[in-house]
Amino acid sequence: MDANYKLSFFRSVPYLFTVICIFIAIVKSTAADDDQLALPGCRSRCGDVDIPYPFGLSEDCYLNRNFSIRCENDNSTGRPTPIYGRNLVVTNISVQLHEITINWFVARKCFNESGHQVRSNTPSLNVSTLTVSGSKNNFVVLGCDSYAFLNGFENGTNYSMGCMSICNNRRDVTDDDGCSGIGCCQTDLPKGRLKRLTINPKSFNRHQSVMSFNPCTYAFVVKRNHFKFSRAFLDDFPEKQLPVVADWTIQKDAPCRTEARNESFCACGGNNTVFEPTAVDGSETQYQCRCAEGYDGNPYLPTGCKETNECLGPGPINCTKSQYCENIPGAYICKERSRSQFPLIKICIGVAIGFIALFISSSWFYLVLKKRKLMQLKEKFFQQNGGLILKQKLSGQEDNSSSTAKIFTEKELIKATNNYDETTIIGRGGFGTVYKGFLPDNRIVAIKKSKLIDQNQTEQFINEVVVLSQINHKNIVKLLGCCLETQVPLLVYEFVPNGTLSEHIHEREKSIKLSWETRLGIAAEAAEALAYLHSAASTPIIHRDVKPSNILLDNFTAKVSDFGASKLVPQDQVELATMVQGTLGYLDPEYLHTNQLTEKSDVYSFGVVLVELLTAKKAISFDRLEEERSLAMHFLCSLKRDRLFEIVVVEGDIANNYKEQVMGVAMIAKMCLSVNGEDRPSMKEVAVELEGLRKMGKHPWANEDDPLIDHLEETEYLIARKDNDSGGSNANSAYDSIRDHVLLDFSGR
């Protein structure tokens, strides 16, 4: 454990006590909140709003229908929303304050340029149990030709008040003025209790003089300090509802619950619950319940209020150091400590300190061991995966840092892939999983997590990493480095953004965009890359798994990738004896039978890739007829029967418009698919032939007499030369290879 880690750990220790105290406080607070919620067995929440009794969400959960709340999904948000009365949205209910916050509608009256009224609404609030709070709301009128009345009852008598707002033009109104009477008027409500309210918006001159910027009068009651005026509101006030604070009470003639203690005022529960009559409509017909001093909770629940333990509460306790607090019903008292109590306190403090010290030391010791064990495991994997060998080999390449593989740490790659999140996976194959990662220098990389490797091949694996990292070819995916701190080595490649050739061949939407020129260009570039690996690399490399899914596209530039099955070829060897690896449908039949891997094995696999480019068919498909399941055999049969253009892909009318080039590519593919490896051309020869066909398409004037004959004569000469070298006949060697081809039974019989 380094010094910074220790320092950060000890700095965090003091916060442990704070966290524990906060947790205890939250638990206590939650328990207190639960005491003042719904009846047992009833829902106490709708969306984000607590619904305490006497309110409730079902018939058995509220005192009477005056306290019924409906929980409905909001059409705009889809979230559960409590509704009171017909259509009042509830945002808060307080049992202690006897308040409910509801969203009440904005009144508006609008006119058109002809002075005709086009829109009007006059909302009213007439709920018998609710009275609008005069001390917690304001009455507001918006407009430049506007006034409005608020009508209702105050303490049982008729009540009416108004507010007026006038201005001549938009320049008269500024946001800084607030509601001063120019564009906006705001006034306080009377301190009494207002019931049965109605808002009536008006206009002096139907807004004709200010129509260009203020066609409407708006009026509303709103919770204090909840509304801030803006000049933009004169054009259009977007709010349809605003919060209003209302007081609620219980009717004296409300039906009683049988659990109630007092039949006269049955809504109040037991345990020091206090009844308070409330004068409304000129008589004491309504009341509220409160907890007596020293008690808290929900006074409306049958269990009533609960005693408050002041000695544990957050409030001040007026006891001296020589005294201790003792809770009594509804209050507390301070008592003098006896001498016998002090040793006990000291013992408790000592035990507590000892426990805390033990906890801290054991936690620190555990973290130290865990980190040390993790570092030892990483070091073990690093050595096991050949890290020391790689470091030694890379030390001699410091003069050429641009082509030197970087050794990444596990921490770097975890951060790059967001801890190998499933969403960063861009490919899965027989040799591992590939993740998309982002390095700190903003480079995008592909990180391949290989499957378990043979520990006996560690040195060869390191050699391959060194050799591959030195390859710098435009058509080969660049190996940037590796990570050896994990059980399975991780390889880091450059990221190629446009997917695999397989996707572009076999997915219909992408295939129709793959023109013949693009197909031929991809084939030529892939052949050039393989030729480079076979003959131009410092140590020849046999790919061993050539297929469209291992050819990536960067804006239709081919890049050969995935060297998980590759083999380095020593300078003094032509073939390698190795266990057969590869993908069914692309495997060289000679390699399959002899276990002798040569460069010509890649040539065969590339021949299958050429056929896929020509036909847009998969190398192996169990959905096709039995004789067509192997694409290579089906292609050679079609070529022998002169039916090549029956299986050529139809996009862009390739068969008719590029007949010469298609035929040339087919002849190259036929040579590559020869059963005898010696009869196949080298990848360098294939690359030259494909590049020639590509240039022929770009410059058709190069062979004006008959470009097909001239080019194919050159190709046939290559075939004839190889046949003569092997003592065979050119006329039948390609077609006879079908007869000698390894037949794999896919029928399952």
Image (spheres, rainbow, N blue to C red):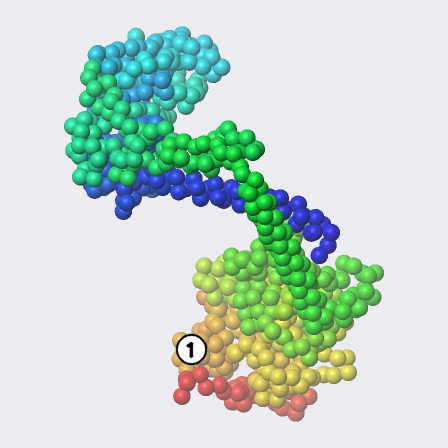
In the displayed structure image, the side of residue 207 where residue 418 appears, left or right: right
**Relative depth, front residue between 739 and 171:** 171
From the image, tell me which residue sits under label 1. Answer: 622
Work out whether 232 lies above or below 675.
above
The x, y position of residue 294, in whole percent, is 38, 31
Q: Residue at x 50, y 28 (%)?
A: 318
Q: How many marks?
A: 1
Work out whether 247 lies above or below 561.
above
The x, y position of residue 588, in whole percent, is 58, 82
Q: Residue at x 37, y 10 (%)?
A: 165
> Which quadrant, please, contains the C terminus?
bottom left
Neighbours of disc 1 within 10 Å: few (<14), some (14-19), many (20+): few
In the displayed structure image, the side of residue 583 where residue 97 appears, left or right: left
Furthest residue to the bottom? Answer: 727
Please say whether residue 371 is visible from this viewpoint.
Answer: no
Please say whether residue 12 is visible from this viewpoint.
Answer: yes
Furthest residue to the front? Answer: 339
In the displayed structure image, the side of residue 197 where residue 2 appears, left or right: right
Q: Residue at x 66, y 62 (%)?
A: 369
The x, y position of residue 20, in whole percent, is 53, 45
**Relative depth, front residue between 488 and 534:** 488
**Relative depth, front residue between 16 and 499:** 16
Q: Secondary structure at mark 1?
A: loop
Q: Residue at x 39, y 39 (%)?
A: 32
Q: Quadrant of residue 308?
A: top left
Q: Quadrant of residue 672?
A: bottom right
Q: Quadrant of residue 155?
A: top left
The x, y position of residue 675, in whole percent, is 58, 85
Check disc 1 and give the amino acid type: Phe
**Relative depth, front residue between 151 and 583:** 151
> Which quadrant, please, contains the N terminus?
bottom right
In the displayed structure image, the side of residue 68 where residue 238 appears, left or right: right
